[in-house]
């Protein structure tokens, strides 16, 4: 198992050993999804394992109503806490050790001054049913609260809540992101 996959699976298990990783893959849909996502990225479409992992990936995304293309750029250690109704655009960049909850949409804006997709830095927590959209940058250690619309640049260590989103604190996500392997 490669280092990136181990970092992903460490976020879902309490023990850093191979048996615990396989246990996490069997029990937690987020761990299973990240494992298969990494395998889809590793093997080409024409490779027999690539084909098997892409079919398995398609079945998982259909079962859990998740739209995350395997071509998207997800950093190591991504934690998907509650695995339902998540949509991530293929052009989005997500940094390392981020947490995404259920109902999150991270999308592309197709017109206007923010035309494009978000770049999300490291250790960002995106709360349930939040929307992050447009060509914006989210800094390190940001906490985006539940039901929040973010369509503006967010500096590091910010807490954003509301619709439309407002920065309410500079405490960030420190203490909320657990089990980080460097």
Image: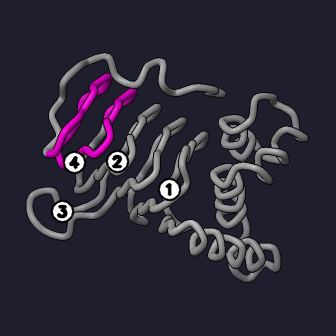
Q: Secondary structure at mark 1?
A: strand
Label whose residue precedes the other's in the sequence (3 or 4): 3
Mark toward the viewer: 2 or 4: 4
State whether residue 79 is above or below residue 113: above
Tell which residue pokes out farthest to the bottom in this image. 46
- Image disc number at residue 9: none
Image x and y of residue 153, in percent: 20, 40
Q: Secondary structure at mark 3?
A: loop
Mark 2–mark 4 distance (CA, rounded to whole Å): 15 Å
Pointer 2: what residue?
119
Image x and y of residue 100, in percent: 47, 45
Pointer 1: what residue?
73
Name the residue rendered at 40%, 55% in the picture: 103
Mark toward the viewer: 1 or 4: 4
Label whose residue precedes the other's in the sequence (2 or 4): 2
Name the residue rendered at 81%, 28% in the picture: 15
Mark 3–mark 4 distance (CA, rounded to whole Å): 16 Å
The stretch of residues the image draws in magenta is 139-163
State whether residue 158 is above or below residue 128: above
Mark 2–mark 3 distance (CA, rounded to whole Å): 13 Å
Label whose residue precedes the other's in the sequence (2 or 1): 1
Label whose residue precedes the other's in the sequence (1 or 4): 1
- Image disc number at residue 149: 4
Pointer 3: what residue?
115
Callouts 3 and 4 close, C-beta under 8 Å:
no
Query: What colour scheme governs how the chains and residues are painted in the rendered image of this protein?
Result: one colour
Q: How many marks?
A: 4
């Amino acid at each position: 198992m490669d280092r990136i996959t181990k970092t992903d699976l460490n976020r879902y298990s309490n023990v850093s050993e191979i048996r615990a990783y396989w246990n996490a893959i069997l029990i937690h849909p987020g761990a299973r999804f990240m494992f298969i996502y990494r395998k889809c990225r590793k093997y080409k479409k024409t490779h027999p394992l690539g084909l098997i992992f892409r079919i398995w990936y398609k079945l998982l995304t259909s079962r859990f109503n998740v739209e995350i293309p395997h071509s998207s750029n997800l950093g190591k250690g991504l934690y998907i806490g509650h695995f339902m109704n998540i949509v991530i655009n293929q052009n989005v960049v997500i940094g390392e050790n981020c947490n995404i909850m259920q109902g999150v949409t991270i999308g592309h804006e197709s017109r206007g001054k923010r035309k494009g997709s978000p770049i999300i830095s490291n250790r960002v927590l995106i709360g349930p049913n939040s929307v992050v959209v447009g060509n914006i940058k989210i800094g390190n250690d940001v906490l985006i609260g539940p039901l929040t619309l973010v369509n503006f640049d967010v500096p590091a260590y910010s807490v954003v809540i509301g619709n439309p989103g407002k920065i309410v604190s500079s405490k960030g996500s420190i203490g909320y992101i657990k089990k980080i392997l460097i």
